[in-house]
Amino acid sequence: MPTEAPHRARSMAEMGAMQAKQMTHEDYLASVRSYKPRATDIVISPFAKCGTTWLQQTFHTLRTRGDMDFDDISRVVPWIETARALDIGLDAPQRGEPRGFKSHLPYDLMPKGAKYVVSLRNPKDHVVSMYRFMEGWWLEPGTVSLTQFAQSNLARLGEGPDYFHHLVSWWEQRDNPSVLLLSYELIVTDPVTTMRKFAAFCGIARTRPCVASSMQSIRDRAEPAHADGDENASARVGTSPVPSCPPTSG
């Protein structure tokens, strides 16, 4: 009997089954448990497609005065949940201080003891961005519509850490001095103000030349409005459902 050639998912159910094979729940838990927070750590933890990459790049360029010598921002600001699957040591030396990490965890599942930065985004825009990100990576282009994608996500609300669980968990911490909440929309319309607030929270010098240098470095790589499109390239290489066919979404 002929074996079916590898292919991207052609339905949401098939995508879920494929993703479940890539990173086990044990790997996920082991990665989170391996992170030992320090009081000066900065953990960037928006929900997926809500500004994570822009915040990672902003943080790293501020702490290093403009370093952009990396192929994937998550190699210099590591992603906590994928550490074990990608064989990344969370205690390995970083290029600058303070230490920084990426996550998508809600507050209730987050290891406590660090400082946390979360940007919040219009849920409609989040869904559209996530759909475009998945199509051509996990989903075969043209096989799942945006409506089907959105309905599938809505049907699973309450079954795990979804968008609204994440949102409410962090919103409840809005008065916590160790938590900084930001607006994705303000990041796009007024990145300099956001950058100054972010730098102050992290304890990083926010002189005008420093902020200008960071802004220029980020502009040279990607505009803020599109910065979430290049997210977790290293994870995508390691988890492509079709290894011989590189991801097409960006």
Image: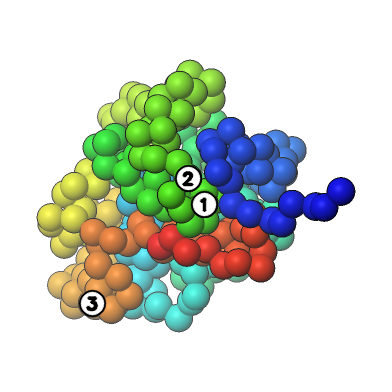
133 up-or-down from 234: above or below? above
Q: Which mark is residue 216?
A: 3
For label 1, the residue is: 140
* Callout 2 secondary element: loop
Q: Which mark is residue 192?
A: none
**How many neighbours does mark 3 have within 10 angstroms: few (below 14), some (14-19), or many (20 or more)?**
some
Residue ranking furthest to the top: 158
Quadrant where the C terminus is found in the figure: bottom left
93 versus 89 height, above or below: below
Q: Residue at x 49, y 69 (%)?
A: 72
Q: Nearer the viewer, residue 145 or 119?
A: 145
Q: Which mark sits nearer the N-terminus, 3 or 2?
A: 2
Disc 1 and disc 2: Cα gap in Å? 6 Å
Amino acid type at mark 3: Gln
Residue at label 2? 143
Coordinates of residue 144 in the picture (x, y in percent)? 45, 41
The image shows residue 235 at horizontal and vertical percentages of 58, 58
Which one is closest to the eye, mark 1 or mark 3? 1
**Alpha carbon of mark 1 to alpha carbon of mark 3: how far?**
36 Å
Front-most of residues 102 and 134: 134
Amino acid on which the number 1 mark rests in the picture:
Glu
Secondary element under disc 3, as helix, strand or loop, is helix
Whether pointer 1 and pointer 2 mark residues with C-beta atoms closer than 8 Å, the reply is yes
| Residue type marked 2 | Thr
Q: Is residue 152 visible?
A: yes
> Quick check: 46 left or right of 108?
left
Residue 225 place in picture, x, y as percent: 23, 59
* Residue drawn where x is 71% and y is 56% of the image: 5
The answer to which of marks 1 and 3 sits earlier in the sequence is 1
- Badge 1: few (under 14), some or many (20 or more) residues near its Cα, within 10 Å? some
Q: Is residue 40 visible?
A: no
Q: Under tag 1, what secondary structure?
A: loop
